[in-house]
Amino acid sequence: MTSRDAPTYERQEKEADSDVAPGVYRFGTNRVNWYVVEAEGELIVIDAGLPNHWEQLLDGLDGLGYSLENIAALVLTHGHGDHIGFANQLQQTANVPVLVHTADVALVEGDGEENMIELVRNLWRPAVIRLLIEFSRSGGTPSPLPSVGSFGTGTDLELPVELQVIHVPGHSTGSCALYLPDRNVLFCGDALATVDLKTGTTRGPQIMSMFNNNTEQAFESLDQLESLGEVTLLPGHGEPWRGEMEEAIHRARSK
Ligand SMILES: [Zn+2]
């Protein structure tokens, strides 16, 4: 079986490039999301999924009538492996700038460590086994990047559309939520998820149940998002959620 035959993603092709907000497209699988934003004829990629999602990117660009040259930047919500999948390939192939918060640069460049304690404790769970199978079928551990661009808290990114950086440490020290004010879209990375990867249950906005650097800090960081009002919440894991951020945070804190 060639790698092209491998079931690298589970979502139906029809849905793989579906728009979740005006000019915002969701890619990945039902467990691992990344997004493409249209802005003035250019594109911004938010997170880079798993390594084999590269094929999805090429197909998606084709379907939308763009090419790799149209990508202005890849902005990472944080430096975990399931978010930097094809980043190296995009940087090497198309010289696309890759940006991440300064506190997660080491993770992206292969010098940091993710917190795997909860993963190891929950290896017996079917949902965790399915997640690991998906990771391994989708290219396994991504290649670190030789170098990456970085931004600090509150930096204005130089992109074809305004994308506000909101530092929400806890899941990782450099975790950021990226707010697209002209479309009321919040790419929250893993600051919030809408699926529990440990059990596979979907119960609306919630703090990640695994891989957190500091779960208490992740809860505290939600304060940074409270005043955003009504948003389309696009998480790293799980389905989109629409509503008031106050409600999303209330739900996450009630679980
Ligand atoms: Zn993560």
Image: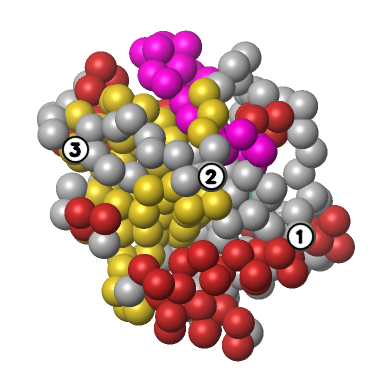
Locate residue 122 relative to residue 74 in the image: left or right.
Answer: right
User: Which residue is under mark 1?
Assistant: 214
* Distance from Cα at disc 2 to Cα at disc 3: 23 Å
Looking at the image, the residue that sits furthest to the bottom is: 254
Q: Quadrant of the C terminus?
A: bottom right
Where is mark 2, residue-wise?
153
Residue ID for mark 3: 39
* In the image, the residue with mark 3 has its CB under 8 Å from the nearest atom of ligand 1: no
Compared across the picture, whether 188 is left or right of 110 comes to: left
Instruction: Specify the segment rendered in magenta.
Output: 79-104
Query: Which structural element holds mark 2?
Result: loop
Residue 33, relative to residue 113: is it above or below? below
Within 8 Å of ligand 1, the CB of disc 2? no
Q: Can see residue 87? A: no
- The numbered dot on residue 76 is none
Between circles 1 and 2, the one closer to the viewer is 2
Q: Amino acid at mark 3?
A: Ala
Could you say which quadrant of the image residue 70 lies in?
A: top left
The percent position of residue 99, horizontal first and vertical second, equals: 48, 30
- First-in-chain label (1 vs 2): 2
Q: Where 41 falls versus 253 (above or below)?
A: above
Apparent side of residue 21 relative to residue 123 in the rendered image (left or right)? left
Residue 195 place in picture, x, y as percent: 53, 69
Q: Is residue 219 visible?
A: yes
Q: Let me know if residue 81 is in the magenta part.
A: yes
Residues 201 and 71: in front is 71
